[in-house]
Image: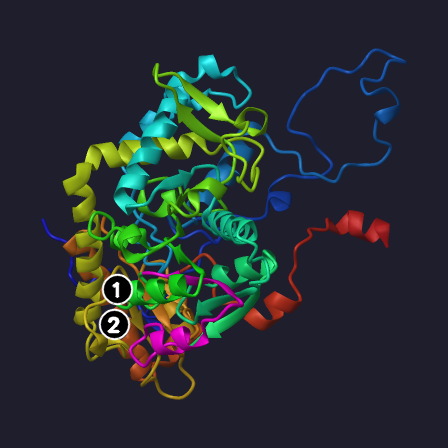
Amino acid sequence: MSINPAGWRPERPETAANAAPATVTGNRALMLEEPLIFEVGSTLTTGVDLAEPPAGKPRLGTLERTTTIGLPGLSEPEAMRHYTRLSRQNYAIDLGLFPLGSCTMKHNPRLNEKMARLPGFADVHPLQPVDTVQGALGVIQELAVWLITLTGMHGVAMSPKAGAHGELCGILAIKAALEAKGEGHRKVILVPESAHGTNPATAAFAGYTVENIPATDEGRVDSAALIARLGPDVAAVMITNPNTCGLFERDMKTISDAVHAVGGFVYCDGANFNAIVGKVRPGDLGIDAMHINLHKTFSTPHGGGGPGSGPVVLSEALSPFGPLPFVAKHADGHFALVEEETAGDDHPQSFGRMVAFHGQMGMFTRALTYILSHGADGLKQVAEDAVLNANYILRSLEGTLSAPYAASGPCMHEALFSDDGFPEGFSTLDVAKGLIDEGFHPMTVYFPLVVHGAMLVEPTETESKAGIDQFVAALRSVAERARAGDATLKTAPHFAPRSRLDETQAARKPVLVWKDAPLAQAAE
């Protein structure tokens, strides 16, 4: 048995219309047309039977409502089916390849989920006495040691809750270090065009002035321009490596040395660490601070706003300024949390607390399980496979999609394409919508901004060759349709639960509130 290398090719709309009769329900076999929950249930009924309260004794006293609540009443089966049907309209990593560039949407082994659900970890409470959570603190400590070892850094702050939160942690540590040296006058942070968009936002949020550094024609930071801008007003450089064009910054050590020579610090966005884990230690490149997205590199849930975790590894120069709390291991093997009231004179330079508690226990457990199950050789293979898969996609689409930096050499974990060569009227958006009909979630589009009509594809390290071949065939087919001027692509997707929206109207005049017709008329 083999997978069709051409991928799933849906019928063209005109063929489907002729071949498939309309249905009374709007359903198409298991593709169910699900109405709004207000259309399923009536606002005048309830799905729950409650006994009448005793006369003269309302259940809620003076808080009882005097007008209808306006919510639909559904039976238990109706409610359950509604949300189950909606869930079937979501794309998920358990359904297929998720090619979002810069996001690392990979399959995470279920072993890690099982470990995170063990009672000793899943039920732990942040306000428990420290003596009752020694195992949990031991997990945090062991993960911290692994992160320091893998990055070649001196210390790590485990409490940041996500990548951008980690960026803020690193910048606040840099700010505290500069102020301790009497150099609080440094107010400029340099950010290359190829960095993640959160980098300049974080610097500005921390009170710094942001200055952009241009990219070279090959998609890497212009190190000459960066070095030329360095001076006594520069606090730090924030650089993403590998960068958002999917390329490794080869001049990283040269840049770090130059920044240190003028008294500044180097912050590295480590969101793409899965491309170099086990292969390169950022500490060897002169990095002072770098966040690690556990939900990208080390197997934790991703998407939907969280939960995330963004520990920040710190150089020896910045470690004293990291945040509280952190886990400390005493000589007798006992673990303790160092917090404001216990920091004493040993940690006077910490910039303080970032979060109410000390991190994300479930994320730490998943990440440590992932690391221990892979081992040093397995983590190295993670990077090698991620890079191999991305380069396979890059070279497989030669002659079909323009790759602006293909001449710069191999890419890292993601392949970057553009809409160059499309006929007038066709764009990256049409390709993305066409991929939906092929059964794939679209790749990241129009990012990074340095490439016109960008299409950023990250296959990650968890996809098989067969799965990638199917995706490549689908993307090639859609791109060829765009190049040929296939008008049906302008109205794609045709086989999704909803067709293409008028995006301008949807953005400016969204319909976000349901009004039941009788209630709306009564209100008017």
- Tag 1 and tag 2, C-beta contact below 8 Å: yes
Q: Indicate the position of residue 369 as horizontal and vertical percent values.
A: 28, 31
Q: Is residue 85 at all visible to an observer of this figure?
A: no
Nearer to us in this view, 262 or 366: 262
Q: Is residue 195 above or below residue 36?
A: below
Nearer to us in this view, 508 or 367: 367
Read off the residue under disc 2: 477
| Mark earlier in primary sequence (1, 2) | 1
Residue 9's label in the rendered image is: 1
Rate crowding at label 2 as few (under 14), some (14 to 19) or many (20 or more) other CA atoms within 10 Å. many
Q: Is residue 268 above or below residue 358?
A: below
Q: Indicate the position of residue 106 as horizontal and vertical percent values.
A: 30, 48
- State yes or no: residue 222 in magenta: yes
Magenta segment boundaries in residue numbering: 215-241
Q: Quadrant of residue 74?
A: top right
Q: Nearer the viewer, mark 1 or mark 2?
A: 2
What residue appears at the point 45 percent right and 55 percent down from the top-left corner?
A: 23
Nearer to us in this view, 87 or 190: 190
Q: Indicate the position of residue 458 as horizontal and vertical percent values.
A: 30, 59
